[in-house]
Amino acid sequence: MAFSGRLAGDLSALGLDRWPAALGPLVEERLADGAHGDMPRWRRALEALPPVSAPAAELDSPTVTLAPGALPAEALPGLRRQLLELSPWRKGPFDVAGVSIDSEWRSDLKWQRVQRAASPLAGRRVLDVGCGNGYYALRMLGAGAACVIGVDPTLLYVMQFRALAHFLGPRPVHVLPLRSEELPPGSAAFDTVLSMGVLYHQRAPLVHLRELRSHLRGGGELVLETLVLPGEEPYARTPPGRYARMRNVWHLPTVPELCVWLARCGFRDIAAADVTLTSVAEQRSTEWMTFESLEEALDPDDPSQTVEGWPAPRRAVVIARRP
């Protein structure tokens, strides 16, 4: 069953007892062998992972380290091959039983910015929307979160998390193959909701913001991280084609416009905590993600612009509360 064991118990503790019945069939369908052409290969990679008698983790350092020293040196080449079968690794870095995963994103740099902006996570119940392979969810657990539920529709990322969880052991952290709009609305179950790198992919960004608000308890905190345009005036633009070689970028607001959107969706205490221009040191191609990355998305003659002539990617972290 998709929602058995630890996951069902953690959802029940959150008051989300109806989620297993509502979402279980969809999750099982998404994780079936026929759901993706690579699913059988990914599943074989997971089944070939070596057993770990004493799972362990170090979650409060830039590199998430799982099962340190658990395997003999001769087992590491095989483990490395199995983890490479789950490429591309977009988020990280990780050290899995001695195998270093140098992901496309230095996600630890973004985490530093987010952690400075957000309220302390100790004891908080967290929903991580667009969570990828769970790097940030694991960092939040390391920061003391009581429970983290992550959702992401990309099946590869879910399988990557399952590989990581093999070495993590039972912890109150989960990644489900779902979109935020598929969750039963109005749970009001979470102290913190994160949406990082998701808003600009939404055709209806205010609908997304209202969905996020519905999952926050009264007084709960939204941590929103998204692409923004430079400028002090409230406006947004829609790229007619690609932006930084991405096809599905729909709306790029300035920070003042983003704050207007949040206010219109019923949030209060809205504050832009950080705006950072993404660098090629933070996002780049590696052995674990061999496709084109940020460098190829920037104008080689003027890296302050994308190859399409838009301002180069900059990301804002905005904090807001549900009254």
Image: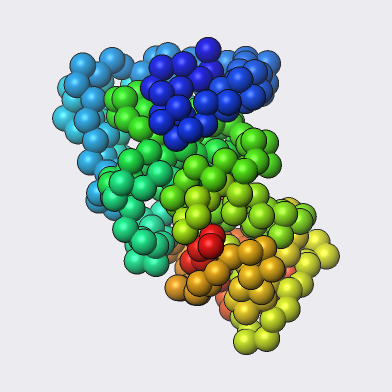
Left or right position of 55 against 43: left
Residue 97 point in image, percent of width and height: 25, 30
Q: Residue 307's quadrant in the figure? A: bottom right
Q: Nearer the viewer, residue 311 or 134?
A: 134
| Residue 250 visible in the picture | yes
Residue shown at the point (65%, 41%) measured from the top left: 185
What's the colour scheme? rainbow
In the figure, 294 relative to 289: above or below?
Answer: below
In the figure, 134 relative to 273: above or below?
Answer: above
Residue shown at the point (50%, 55%) measured from the top left: 218
Q: Residue 58's quadrant in the figure? A: top left
In the figure, 147 relative to 229: above or below?
Answer: above
Residue 313 point in image, percent of width and height: 59, 69
Residue pushed farthest right?
240
Number of marks drawn: 0
Q: Nearer the viewer, residue 307 or 282?
A: 282
Residue 51 point in image, percent of width and height: 28, 15
| Residue 301 visible in the picture | no
Residue shown at the point (56%, 22%) measured from the top left: 20
Left or right position of 157 against 136: right
Q: Nearer the viewer, residue 54 or 291?
A: 54
Residue 60 point in image, percent of width and height: 25, 49
Residue shown at the point (41%, 54%) measured from the top left: 107
Q: Residue 147's quadrant in the figure? A: top left
In the figure, 15 relative to 256: above or below?
Answer: above
Residue pushed farthest bottom?
232
